[in-house]
Image (cartoon, grey):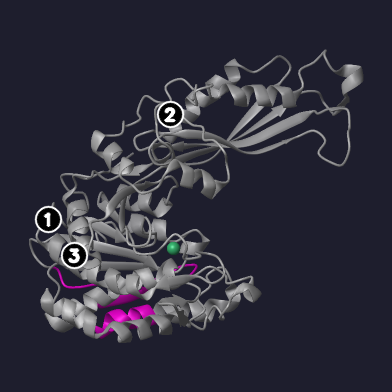
Amino acid sequence: MNAVSDYINSRRSAFADDLAELLRIASVSADSRQNAETRRAADWVAAQFKNVGLATEVIPTAGHALVYAESPPVPGKPVVLVYGHYDVQPPEPLDEWISPPFEPTVRDGNIYARGATDDKGQMLTHVKSVEAWIKSVGKLPLQVKFLIEGEEEVGSEHLEPYVEKNRNKLACDAVVISDCSQFAPGIPAITYGLRGIAYYELRLRGPKQDLHSGTFGGAITNPANALVALLAALKDANGRIQVPGFYDDVVPLSEREREEYRALPLTDEEFMRSVGVAEMFGEAGYSAIERRWARPTCDINGLTSGYQGEGAKTVLPAKASAKFSFRLVPNQDPKKIAKSLRKFLKDRLPPGIEMELVDHHGAPGVLISLESPYIHAAATAIEAAFGRAPVFVREGGSIPIVNTFARELGADVLLLGWGQNDDNTHSPNEKFSLDDYHRGTLASAHLWEQIAKLESRGQGSGVGGQGKKKD
Ligand SMILES: [Zn+2]
């Protein structure tokens, strides 16, 4: 391992130059005028793999190409699949950039450019760690596969079918993704859980047209009144969701998790200041972090009804609708919840109102056990590179591709973010710390060594004994 670390340390500025070269390519996947640049980024990544002798393919799709590469199999050792993306968000608004988005510039130890942290810099740490092993030791201690896509910023349309059709090719024991953040500067993190989602639109219809509220009000149900009553019934005063069976499959927080969260350096005061509220509210008995990461919620995302123009209009609207969603925790089934929700709303529908419930999209949550040997290996690797043990965090949002990998490959997904929360992802002046780039590369190199110490749980089958295949 010393030879590998020495190689990474001695190439520090060369690796930064390589990152700058990739950042100069304007691979904006949403912008078809940049299709040639986007393709050039795919070829650039493929060339990195070919240079160290990996079997490499640039796979065309109906959209932007996928880059696949793999090192030789190492019998008896686990297989790791690294996922990342070479495409970037559009850089606009251009006049808010201090230096141009595709002219990488280093200021205060950070490299500024579109894609610096999301995801070119983070993705490249794994490419460079593989180079370091091959150039210094001659080979990797386990097989590493790479799947790098060019459509992450536009919805990964062609990735999911590719993964579904290539389960054997992509078979692995663990998936490694570095496309998120550390907890705070100097506090690296492993994200071991994501919430799922169930998103709905409720449309109510009353009279055949908008009516005069003075002439008709009081004699029929107002759809807007009905809508707010139905939405209000979804939660009680303690923040508990009232849909029958909603909590049946919720996995409770373990004592270890609650302890981990309590130790995190984020106070309620800091949280309230960051979102600009004077008081917090949520499900009774849980801290703010627990509510955001590990408890299900229900939030209205949009409401439409009646008159919303200037001044007053005494209207009794004919229609009212709302978009709302539940954030789900692992093990909750979006389909089961949809069924129960539909009945809950129907049972409460006031007289003279017709309802339509549109089921927009749903995805289950993901949870990797903190006892997973892969989580343990990642923690050891991160500590070796960053000089402190990572904290264990969950993310309140969903990352659809993580569901796809967990479902199709049955592998533990390691979300190892090297970025910072203030990296301006998707915003002007995106940056990535060159120290974090370096430490991330070292951590990745250590990760291969740590995972190689583990027993493979059945490479080639795609789903091992501890597979997490979900329905
Ligand atoms: Zn990203």
Position of residue 317 measured from the top left corner of the image (x, y, whole percent)? 81, 28
Q: State yes or no: discs 1 and 3 in contact (Cβ < 8 Å).
A: no
The amino acid at mark 2 is Lys
Position of residue 112 measured from the top left corner of the image (x, y, whole percent)? 48, 76
The quarter holding residue 141 reads bottom left
Q: Judge whether residue 64 is colored magenta.
A: yes
Numbered range of the magenta stretch? 44-73
| Distance Cα–Cα, label 1 vs label 2 | 35 Å
Position of residue 220 measured from the top left corner of the image (x, y, whole percent)? 80, 15
In the displayed structure, would residue 14 be above or below residue 86?
below
The amino acid at mark 3 is Ala
Q: What residue is disc 2 on?
A: 336
Give the residue at x 58% y 73%: 32
Q: What residue is disc 1 on?
A: 456
For the C terminus, the quadrant is top left
Give the residue at x 62% y 23%: 230
- SS assignment at label 2: helix
Question: Is label 3 or label 2 in front?
Answer: 3
What is the crowding at mark 1: few (fewer than 14 residues within 10 Å), some, or many (at least 20)? some
Residue 363 visible in the picture: no
